[in-house]
């Protein structure tokens, strides 16, 4: 997990355009990276390497589909923890090791670690939270979704 901002030069114009295009959709095709590459005048290998590099430097935390767990009968929950600064990295690794954790980010607030949990069944939210509490010794605050909001994400060019 990256804890400091990237320098402005960490992403070039192609990286930024690629991120924006991938946020808008990913082709469902036998060779989706090749289709993306064609749009950018790149090779399939170059697109994959750029995505891998952006993950390595912490510009993106993951690359993959985002499933609507609630629409499939499951549940989402926004969670937060107050993590002592000296334990932040270790707790982040513990939390992120759970397959139910979609993403995790730091905030400058008493509740400084926030993450999204997705489970197959609603009752599993409390069970996973209890497991994380047992592993870390820290309270997991649950903020279940009440209203769905869709926001766009664009990286400044």
Image (tube, rainbow, N blue to C red):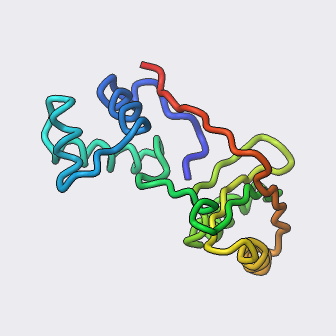
Q: Which picture quadrant has residue 94?
A: bottom right
The residue furthest top is 157
86, 133: nearer the viewer = 133
- The location of residue 144, given as percent across then percent down, is 79, 57
44 versus 75 height, above or below:
above
Q: Residue at x 85, y 67 (%)?
A: 139
Q: Quadrant of the C terminus?
A: top left
Q: Is residue 4 placed above or below 130 in the rendered structure?
A: above
In the rendered image, residue 36, in percent from the top left (x then y), is placed at 23, 39
Percent across and percent down for residue 6 are 50, 34
Camera-side residue of 145 and 141: 145
Q: Residue 38 at what x, y percent from top left?
A: 15, 34
Q: Which residue: 65% across, 49% down?
A: 105
Q: Residue at x 28, y 51 (%)?
A: 28
Up the image or down, 53 lies above or below 79; here it is above
- How many numbered discs sit on the rendered protein? 0
Q: Nearer the viewer, residue 96 or 8?
A: 96
Compare residues 23 and 47 and report the one nearer the observer.
23
Determine which quarter of the picture holds residue 84.
bottom right
**In the rendered view, would you say 150 is above or below 92?**
above
Q: Say whether residue 58 is left or right of residue 130.
A: left
Measuring 18% from the left and 56% from the top, which residue is drawn there?
30
């Amino acid at each position: 997990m990256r804890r400091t901002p990237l320098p402005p030069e960490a992403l070039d114009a192609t990286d930024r355009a690629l991120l924006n295009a991938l946020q808008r959709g990913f082709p469902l095709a036998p060779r989706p990276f090749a289709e993306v590459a064609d749009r950018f005048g790149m090779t399939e290998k170059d697109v994959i390497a750029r995505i891998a590099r952006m993950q390595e430097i912490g510009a993106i935390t993951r690359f993959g589909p985002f499933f609507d767990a609630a629409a499939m009968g499951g549940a989402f929950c926004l969670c937060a923890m107050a993590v002592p600064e000296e334990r932040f990295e270790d707790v982040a690794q513990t939390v992120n090791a759970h397959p139910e954790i979609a993403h995790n980010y730091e905030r400058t607030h008493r509740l400084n670690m926030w993450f999204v949990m997705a489970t197959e069944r609603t009752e599993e939210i409390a069970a996973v939270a209890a497991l994380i509490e047992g592993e870390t010794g820290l309270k997991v605050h649950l903020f279940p979704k009440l209203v769905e909001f869709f926001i766009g994400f664009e990286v400044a060019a």
